[in-house]
Image: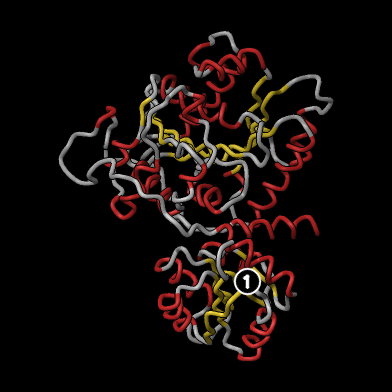
Amino acid sequence: MAGKIRVLIVDDVQESRENVERLLRFEPNIEIAGSAARGQDAIELTISKRPDIVLMDVNMPDMDGIVATRAIMSQSPSTGVIMMSVLNEPDVLRRSMLAGAREFLVKPFSLDELLSSIQNVHVSTPRHTIQHGPALEPTGSAQPPNGVSTRSSGRARVITVASVKGGVGKTTLATNLAVALQQECDLRVAIIDGNISFGDVGLMMNVSDSKTILDAVPYLRQIDQELMSNITAVHASGVTLLLAPPSPQEAEVVTPDLVRGSLTAMKSMFDVIIIDSRASFDDMTIGLFDESDVILLVVTMDMTAIKGARQFIEVTELLGYPGDRVRLVLNRVNGYSGIPAEEIGESLRRPIWARVPDEPGPVQRSINEGVPLVGSSTDSKAASEIRRIAHEIAAEYDPEKQVATPEFRQPRSGLVKRLKVALRSD
């Protein structure tokens, strides 16, 4: 970590500001960039002094910390905000996440808690950009390549495939479901690789196109259908792919705002958008969950996956998602795990919405060859179940009945981790 971490302290109570400054005064890698007693002052000081971290109190007389944080994020997205409050309530946590805060400290807090939050936020906040040559002009009259329609009627149904544990077959399900919806159900389908740092959608579908969401970085404020048509690839099945960057280092510049703009533009171009999300709770992933009509939670028949699924469901309940948004998909169903499928549903207190049979041979060949199972195996039971899932989703699609999902928010991973800790302590 090069240089000192510059911290701005914002609290309307002078004694509280002085206490925080006293805690940090003798830390060799931290510099106090200033302090403010009002939200508006915090915004102005952030713009003028460019601190790395803002310690923001929630309750202030002129402008509360949540409103001030939202303004700071819009003008200085490279600043990490840590919210401070005497209220340890899920609603305050959620509102703080949506405003853009990355961590939440409950008063009174210890020096260790404060330093841990500052260091975590400083490390996780991107502060540099990678220069890329423009992939195309974002405006103009050129016809979109790839054969992608830019129809303006209707709105795509957004289906996010999720898990808390890696290796459960999430990407396999997402890619095969997209192909089944396109080919079996006569719908225009796109798949977005939401695992921005380590996405495998291109590999699974044997698409090595050099175009990725990274090409949209220079056009953050000009994202439209034409741009998305130019930076997406089209699979042989007809499914359109918005791929992840080729390396984790380049992925650092892909922000939630960029994903929001891309998804918003694509909603009026397709009937269904499948999102293969990252197997974790981070700001990008929670933002995609917020945008989803349905979340398919993939679970396998082992205790670690079941435990993760239980925590996932509890956190989504705390975040206020309606119960029918999250649907359980039991993957790799077999008779040798020792855990009956019915008991898994009872443990999670949710019905199992779909059961995909375990077929390691055909599935592994499909992955290695880059050919989706639903397009290459007519006698596969797993492929048959994925086709059934596709038809059920297609039956629910009605562009006249689609309503806009809530505006994309920027929840932050540190807060979600604290929610999970709270859950474990209940």
- Please, which colouring scheme is shown? secondary structure
Q: Nearer the viewer, residue 144 or 182?
A: 144
Q: Describe residue 288's horizontal placement relative to residue 385 as left or right.
A: left
Query: Between residues 389 and 145, which one lies in front from this camera angle?
Result: 145
For residue 71, which quarter of the picture? bottom left
Number of on-image labels: 1
Q: Quadrant of residue 81?
A: bottom right
Q: Is residue 145 visible?
A: yes
Image coords of residue 86 (percent x, y): 68, 77
The answer to which of 402 and 69 lies nearer the viewer is 69
Q: Is residue 152 visible?
A: no
Residue furthest toward the left?
141
Crowding at dot 1, Cα within 10 Å, few <14 / some 14-19 / many 20+, comes out as few
Q: Which residue sits at x=55%, y=81%?
A: 10
Q: Position of residue 202 (x, y in %)?
A: 46, 28
Q: Circle 1 is placed at which residue position?
A: 29
Choose top left, top right, bottom left or bottom right for residue 278: top right
Task: Identify the secondary structure beneath mark 1.
Answer: loop
